[in-house]
Image: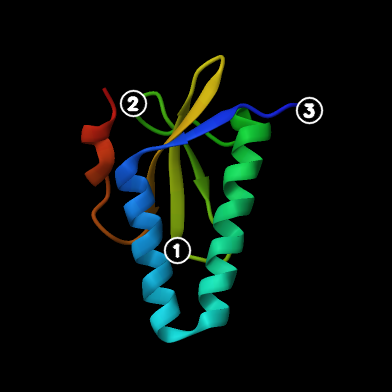
């Protein structure tokens, strides 16, 4: 199966970096595990974006398995855009302004 190009919204990059820093302040191994799960999520979405459920405003949501985060993304025929790396227990829907 081929994968599509993945673009990551600048604010989603900042969210991922902030989460990594938070885990790094507590445990280097936790930070590594977080990044590994993030990488796995991005790869899985790139290969099969339709696998995860529809969410809101034309997006889909991939929920992390080991961390309280999820990716919000949308797809086109040629690419995937990750809109948010959101914490599952904070500020629901804060990212909706990023969806045109």
Left or right position of 33 against 16 = right
What is the spatial separation of the Cα atoms under label 1 and label 3, in whole angstroms?
A: 29 Å
Instruction: Where is residue 92? Give x, y as percent.
Output: 27, 50
Quarter of the rendering containing residue 9: top left
Q: CA distance from mark 2 to mark 3?
A: 27 Å
For label 1, the crowd category at 10 Å Cα-Cα, with few meaning under 14, some 14 to 19 and many 20 or more, is few
Residue furthest top as drawn: 77
Cα–Cα gap, marks 1 and 2: 22 Å
- Asked whether 67 or 4 is in front, the reply is 4
Of marks 1 and 3, which one's residue comes earlier in the chain?
Answer: 3
Q: Earlier in the sequence, mark 2 or mark 3?
A: 3
Residue 1, numbered label: 3
Q: Nearer the viewer, mark 1 or mark 3?
A: 3
- Please tell me whether mark 2 sits on a helix, a strand or a loop: loop
Q: Which mark is residue 68?
A: 1
Quadrant where the N terminus is found in the figure: top right
Whether residues under marks 1 and 3 lie with C-beta atoms below 8 angstroms apart, the answer is no
Residue at (26, 22) in percent of width and height? 100
Q: Can residue 10 be seen in this snapshot?
A: yes
The numbered mark, 1 or 2, whose residue comes first in the sequence reads 2
Q: Is residue 19 above or below residue 73?
A: below
Give residue 47's quadrant in the image. top right
Q: Position of residue 8 (x, y in %)?
A: 43, 39
Residue identifier under label 2: 57
Residue 87 visible? The answer is no
Q: Residue at x 40, y 57 (%)?
A: 16
- Left or right of 44? Residue 70 is left
């Amino acid at each position: 199966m081929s994968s599509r190009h993945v673009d990551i919204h600048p604010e989603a990059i900042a969210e991922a970096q902030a989460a990594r820093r938070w885990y790094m302040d507590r445990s280097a191994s936790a930070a590594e595990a977080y990044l590994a799960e993030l990488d796995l999520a991005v790869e899985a979405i790139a290969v099969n974006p339709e696998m995860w459920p529809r969410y809101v405003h034309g997006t889909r949501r991939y929920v992390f398995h080991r961390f309280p985060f999820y990716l919000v993304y949308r797809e086109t025929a040629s690419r995937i855009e990750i809109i948010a790396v959101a914490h599952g227990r904070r500020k629901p829907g804060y990212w909706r302004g990023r969806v045109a």
